[in-house]
Amino acid sequence: MLIDDSFLIVEFTEITLLHIFILLGAPYIIFYFFEKFTKFDKFLEKWEGALFIFAVGGSVSIISIVLQEISGISFIYLYITLLIYLIIALWIIGLIYYPTNHKSQIRRWIRIRMNDGNMYVGNILESDSEYIKLGRLDSRKIEKIDSKNKKTFLDAKKILLSKSAITVLFYY
């Protein structure tokens, strides 16, 4: 199934749903799942992400058309092959920059010493200008060490600590 040479040479009013689907549909679905599984949120504005997806979809389509002209292989096969390469590239980027294993989460465990002498050991979940939210991501519980070095494990999954009551933070 060969695509005509004038497939993308159309006026603005002649753009069909097929053009839109080929340019945006499959790349959008791929990026949607990539963002969903890796928590990728590098685009500050939604239009930047949409423009990026449009550019990637257009590039994949144009490269498929050019390769079809050079090799004579069907557009659909080339398009699907390039989408598979896109999926593999995003998968590699996800493994390198967005690891989901527990070793990367262990680095986020901190020890907090409060003004009253108590210490808390847990995973930092969120932080803003006033509070730090500690929690646990696996079976390890939040640990409380009182001023006499007596350790107790809290059953709470999350605790909220005021930054004004914190004396020292230890990251490990």
Image: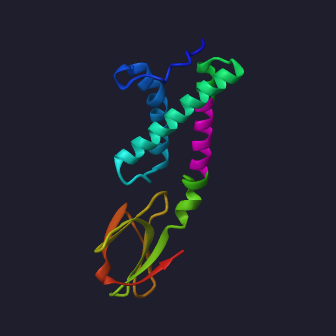
The N terminus, quarter of image: top right
Residue 128, relative to residue 69: is it above or below? Answer: below
Q: Is residue 88 magenta?
A: yes
> Which of 28/96 is in front?
28
Q: Quadrant of the C terminus?
A: bottom right
Q: Is residue 156 visible?
A: no
What residue is shown at x 55% (from left), y 15% (from top)?
4
Horizontal side, residue 51 vs residue 57: left or right: left
Q: What's drawn in magenta, residue-wise?
A: 82-95
36 or 69: nearer the viewer: 69
Q: Look at the picture and state if 50 lies above or below 104.
A: above
Left or right: residue 87 versus residue 144 is: right
Q: Is residue 129 visible?
A: yes
Q: Specify how the rendered protein is coloured.
A: rainbow
x, y percent for residue 26: 48, 29
| Image x and y of residue 114, in percent | 36, 83
Quarter of the image for residue 166 reads bottom left
Q: Where does residue 156 sit, x and y in percent of width and height?
A: 35, 63
Indicate yes or no whether the magenta region holds residue 46: no
Relative image position of residue 50 (x, y in whole percent): 40, 41
